[in-house]
Amino acid sequence: MKLVNKIEVASMKSEYCKVEHHNIVIDDIPLDILLHNYYPENHLLGMIPTIIDWIDNPKEKELIKERFNSAESEFVLPILMCPDDCDLWCTVIVADVIKADGFITWKHIGFDKSTREELLQGYESLGTKVDWLDKIPPMIFEESQYIAQLSKIYD
């Protein structure tokens, strides 16, 4: 039997964003705080979800929606971004997502390392070079709960 994590999207304030906004919460801990607990030196506290409504660039929105709704069994999804710019050019945290047997697994989480030059060519490079955060364990979610919750951010 798989140990399943609970995922929800809750409205709350974060470290640098003093208005309430959608936040990804894993097992009752906001994702930025969860990552910060493993890597306090990496300045992850205050990162916010890649909220479609907060991103201005239509191509960035399209990429995130396409990745979230991907029919592929494995893909890389941008999940957190810097609250200062709300785009995919600043610090972006991605998850290596695996879909199988009614479950969604975040196999790895890490920093996207796409260069400015690569992003100027298109956003497809996002997630091709990643500095994985090896201390973060895989997270397994029931697919129905995962879709219902993250649709609040990505649809």
Image (tube, rainbow, N blue to C red):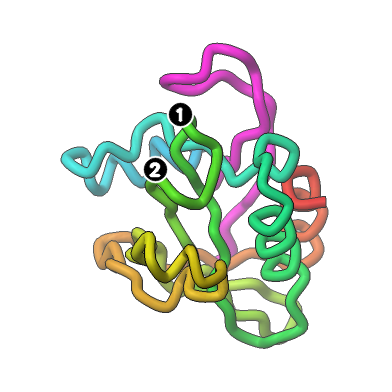
- Element marked by disc 2: helix
Q: Is residue 63 magenta?
A: no
Label total for image: 2
Residue that appears at 75% across and 38% down: 53
- Which span is picked out in magenta? 1-27
Residue that appears at 77% across and 70% down: 69
| Label at residue 34 | 2
Q: Is residue 72 left or right of residue 37?
A: right
| Label at residue 94 | none
- Element marked by disc 1: loop
The answer to the question of whether label 1 and label 2 lie on touching residues, with beta carbons closer than 8 A, is: no
On screen, residue 18 above or below 62: above
For label 1, count other residues whose C-alpha is less than 10 Å away and answer few (under 14), some (14-19) or many (20+).
few
In the rendered image, which residue does mark 1 sit on? 84
- The span from disc 1 to disc 2 (Cα, nearest Å) is 20 Å
Q: Is residue 151 left or right of residue 24?
A: right
Residue that appears at 39% across and 36% down: 33
Residue that appears at 64% across and 72% down: 104
Closer to the camera in the image, 47 or 25: 47
Q: Is residue 12 magenta?
A: yes
The answer to whether any part of residue 2 appears in the image is: no
Q: Position of residue 143 (x, y in %)?
A: 74, 68
Closer to the camera in the image, 55 or 71: 55
For label 2, count other residues whose C-alpha is less than 10 Å away and answer few (under 14), some (14-19) or many (20+).
some
Q: Quadrant of residue 10?
A: top right
